[in-house]
Image (cartoon, grey):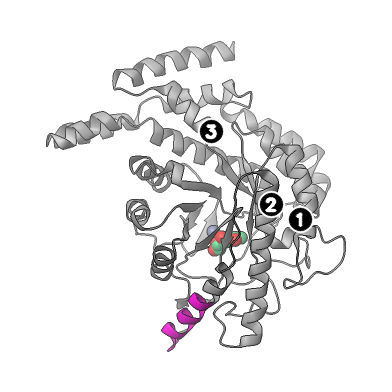
Amino acid sequence: MKEQLIQKAYEIAKERYSAIGVDTDKAIAELEKQQISLHCWQTDDVVGFERNEAVSGGIQTTGNYPGRARNIDEVRHDIEFVKTLLAGHHRLNLHEIYGDFGGKFVDRDQVGVEHFQSWMDWAKEQDMKLDFNSTSFSHPKSGNLTLSNPDKGIRDFWIEHTKRCRRIADAMGKAQGDPCIMNIWVHDGSKDTTVNRKKYREILAASLDEILAEKLPDMKPCVEAKLFGIGLESYTVGSMDFYEGYCATRNVIYTLDTGHYEQTENVADKVASLLLYVPELMLHVSRPVRWDSDHVTIMNDQTLDFFKELVRADGLHRAHVGLDYFDASINRIGAYIIGARATQKCILSALLEPLQKLREYEANGQFFERLALLEEAKSLPMGAVFDYFNLKNNVPVGEDFIPTIQQYEKEVTSKR
Ligand code: RNT
Ligand code: ZN
């Protein structure tokens, strides 16, 4: 019965959209192809398997909702479950601290491909591709400066770590026959005023140049900009301006975390400029709230506008979509699904925009008509299309995922 209703609602929606020149079947097919890189760190509050300590170094998780994944099997189990609730084919984004260290302590400058072999085997079984991240936080040598540290000993430690991570990413890319996207985010900065802004940036650029010098064809590096970190409020070495210049001059992928900008800034507006100068974007879809950049992604104006700009700039195929938030205050699997589905809804809304008609109006100087259609498009039945997309892909429709997650909590996460 419910299925028939969803199908009926879809048929009606399809006609409504078709009347303004939008092909809903095509939008669904595109959304089905759109991979989301699922961030493994939502399962366990960014703790990982290196030293079992709370995350530190510019970021923080708050909340102590029960059920955190405590080891590699639990992380994998959670991700296998998450996959069953999402339509489409998704990737897994790993951090270095999630290596399979076999109970031994492996320092960051000692890590190798062997520590990720079991992940590669698992990913193959799961038919999931892997992405990767070097980890320069949560370590005694993290301090306030890593790759930009004037102390050569500390800097070299992190350079070695990041080089090794690139080789791991390359091995992953080779194994999966598809480039592994490896993100480099360093929290480097200072709590209070520094009088050496340029100096640390020069060092960071030189460190990155050294790290990226090795040719590794099966991985693609990307570097992530940020406004500020917790405890590092006055200065961030890897600011937006720094990485825009770096990526443009070195032809490197720019990682745009939607939570990393001034709250009143229009993050969507950055897309069309960045795409003129950088080869591709890596997205960390997140939600800033006051000082925090990592609340669960929801379908809000910022995220909607962001994906609309991406589609308008014909940039979806030049963006690697990933999630980045860590909420320890609610059911973590629930948070995962809410954010992933919200991202899909925003992408779908962007794909359903009557762009051709809007652009015709704009070209003709018909600005009342353009604004009117933009407004009307907001209340078109996107939800009916999204429901059908989920039904078609045999995953829960609408709020039906709530009881499924409650069940998983009862049987699995509450017993941890
Ligand atoms: C931090 C950055 C970074 C991290 C992850 C864990 O502000 O967004 O991407 O969240 O690497
Ligand atoms: Zn991020």
Camera-side mark, 2 or 1: 2
Residue 173 horizontal side relative to residue 305, left or right: right
Q: Identify the amino acid type marked 1.
A: Phe
Q: What residue lies at 41% left-to-right and 43% top-to-bottom?
A: 307
Q: Main secondary structure of the magenta part?
A: helix
Q: Secondary structure at mark 2?
A: helix
Residue on which disc 1 sits = 116
Q: Earlier in the sequence, mark 3 or mark 1?
A: 3
Q: What residue lies at 42% left-to-right and 89% top-to-bottom?
A: 195
Q: Identify the amino acid type marked 3.
A: Lys
Number of other residues with Cα within 10 Å of mark 1, as a class: few under 14, some 14 to 19, many 20 or more: many
Residues at circles 2 and 1 in contact by the CB criterion of under 8 Å: yes
Q: CA distance from mark 3 to mark 2?
A: 21 Å
Image quarter of residue 83: top right
Q: Secondary structure at mark 1?
A: helix
Q: CA distance from mark 2 to mark 1?
A: 8 Å
Residue on which disc 3 sits = 33
Q: Quadrant of ligand 2?
A: bottom right
Residue 201 magenta-highlighted: yes
First to last magenta residue range: 193-206
Instruction: In the displayed orientation, state which residue is furthest to the left.
Output: 365
Residue on which disc 2 sits = 172
Instruction: In the displayed orientation, state which residue is furthest to the right.
Output: 103
